[in-house]
Amino acid sequence: MIDTHCHIDLYDNPIEIANECEKLGIITIGMTNLPSHFEMGYKHLRSYQKVRLALGLHPLHSELHKSEFPAFVRNIPHTSYIGEIGLDFSKEGIASKDTQTESFKRILTEVADKRKIVSLHSRKAENEVFKFLIQYNIKAAIFHWYSGPLNLIEKIANQGYYFSVNPAMIKSKNGQAIINKIPRDKILTESDGPFIKVNDREIKPSDLGIINEYFSKVWLISEENVQTIISTNFKRLISFLK
């Protein structure tokens, strides 16, 4: 299984989660919300084969972006994955819209000429995020937990970008409608742990079978074939890194 968006460092027992992923062979991309968090976790996870840590600057931590940005630039060479980054223009984030936008543009400027895969937060700012990706010529991107307009999905997919789907999305009508619009060759899976609950507990990457089971029913194919599709998509994406 493949978890393209999991906040391993925010679990109470991050090393236990990482060890489980390693043992079960679950490819897991660990997001971070700040470069200082990346620096703390990188030394612990750099030797893992299945777990990789992404370098992030979360839009909802924009008050720290100025002080954290030098660490962001300093750590870019240490990972192929950038995330969680993006914009949040919801009620929770709209007050810092200008600061977020300037930070996002600075981030994209830093990574635009490098072989990096970015994982994107785009709540209520999907059009803006998409516009900036094109403007800065970003080649490899994943829209994490997309919740935006249905009519934008095709444009995003046609640009070659991907969408990561989690178990919370398959439980809502809006989430299901979004998933149905995503081309099969642009779908990836994510847990977004520990922010989602499964059976009244925090989700883990090992719970991603829930999504495979859902796709199996919707697509009328075996779970094995679902996993083949997801794996093929991921391999195609990371081929950009070579």
Image (cartoon, rainbow, N blue to C red):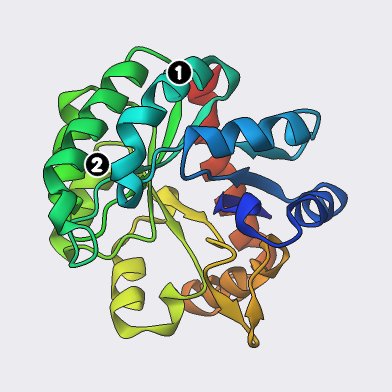
Q: Residue at x 41, y 30 (%)?
A: 68
Compared with residue 202, is residue 64 higher up or lower down, i.e. above or below?
A: above
Label 2 or label 1, whichever lies nearer to me, is 1
Q: Position of residue 218 (x, y in %)?
A: 47, 77
Residue at numbered disc 1: 115
Looking at the picture, tell me which residue is in the foreground, 132 or 156. Answer: 132
Q: Position of residue 239 (x, y in %)?
A: 54, 25
Left or right position of 101 against 20 = left
Give the Cα distance between marks 2 and 1. Answer: 20 Å
Compared with residue 218, is residue 33 higher up or lower down, i.e. above or below?
A: above
Compared with residue 148, is residue 116 higher up or lower down, i.e. above or below?
A: above
Q: Position of residue 176 (x, y in %)?
A: 36, 77
The amino acid on which the numbered mark 1 sits, given as a three-letter code, is Arg
Left or right position of 196 against 110 = right
Whether the residues at callouts 2 and 1 have beta carbons within 8 Å, the answer is no
The amino acid on which the numbered mark 2 sits, given as a three-letter code, is Asn
Residue at numbered disc 2: 158
Secondary structure category for the residue under label 2: helix
Secondary structure category for the residue under label 1: loop
Residue 105: mark in rendering: none
The reply to whether residue 55 is visible in this rendering is no
Residue 12 placement: quadrant: bottom right
Q: Residue at x 39, y 38 (%)?
A: 57
Quadrant into which the C terminus falls: top right
